Amino acid sequence: MMELEIELKKASDSLKSWDTTSISLTAGCDLFMRYVTRTSALEYEDFNSAKSRLIERAEKFGEISYKARRIIAMLSQDFIFDGCTILVHGFSRVVLEVLKTAAQNKKLFRVLCTEGRPDRTGLRLSNELAKLDVPVKLLIDSAVAYSMDEIDMVFVGADGVVESGGIINMMGTYQIALVAHSMNKPVYVAAESYKFARLYPLDQKDMAPALRPIDFGVPIPSKVEVETSARDYTPPQYLTLLFTDLGVLTPSVVSDELIQLYL
């Protein structure tokens, strides 16, 4: 059994090496390993029985992860009301599921969608919302403060949810949360539990950089330095609630949930 666990660890490490900056990939692999191997029965069963038990638990983990977005979408529906305006940032599959479910429930709302530099993923989300006939308005990222007066709530995804209850997400999330907080607008995070990571960043530079190329559309002189980091850290005090497949959480209880996940 020890050899089988070693092989699983090798496969997990191989997946994580594909993108060493992805927090959700690393956390997902770590949680998968813990979930699959966390059973005392493996120590007493014969190899074939133990193998079947591992496969069964792996499939169960996959089923839980697959259902996560749907659970999160259902939990968030009470917070989306008719006539509201929602600000979203970049492209998040779970946020899209939240909005898609609200549209299917015949709720009347509109969405302001940031462009999502540097990779402009907000364009993708705005296209998906348009297909659902959801009223959507595309904003340049620097127009967030200008538009905050007409916004009722902010919905963002997360690349990782850290031990403090804060999140690491695409660049610009932090400044959106700051503006929303200063204007008393709730900031909601939609994130699957497999994105809960055992990290505790103290500031913006206290995490491995995720660098992305940036096209400014014009030549940049070689003497000009360009910031290419693609994500930032939003501290918990600027977040209102986290919608997860574990339930609706306040940032302050995230550390307790992490302990349970990684036991």
Image (cartoon, helix red, strand yellow):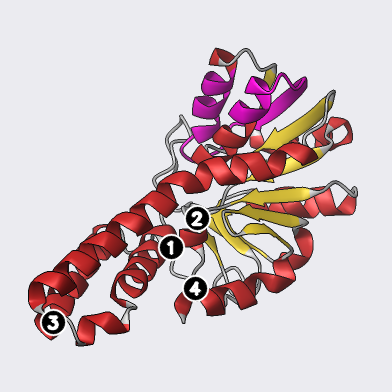
- Residue at mark 3: 1
Query: In the rendered image of this protein, does residue 62 appear above or below residue 236?
Result: above
For discs 3 and 2, the disc positioned in front in the rendered view: 3
Q: Nearer the viewer, residue 237 or 109?
A: 109
Rendering coords of residue 176 (x, y %):
72, 48
State the separation of the CA atoms marked 4 and 2: 17 Å
| Discs 4, 1 touching: Cβ within 8 Å | no
Circles 3 and 4, Cβ within 8 Å, touching? The answer is no
Q: First in sequence: mark 3 or mark 4?
A: 3
C-alpha distance separating marks 3 and 4: 23 Å
The residue tagged 1 is 23
Q: Which residues are magenta?
A: 100-129
Question: Quick check: is 117 in the magenta stretch?
Answer: yes
Image: 38 above or below 13: below
Residue 248: x %, y % from top left: 69, 56
State whether residue 261 appears in this view. Answer: yes
**In 3D space, how far apart are the residues under numbered discs 4 and 1 (Cα atoms)?**
16 Å
Tag 4: residue type? Leu
Q: Which residue is mark 4?
A: 261
Lower sequence index among marks 2 and 1: 1
Three-letter amino acid code of the residue under disc 3? Met
Q: Residues within 10 Å of mark 1 (few under 14, many from 20)?
A: many
Q: Position of residue 240 (x, y in %)?
A: 78, 56
Which tag, 4 or 2, sits closer to the chain's start?
A: 2
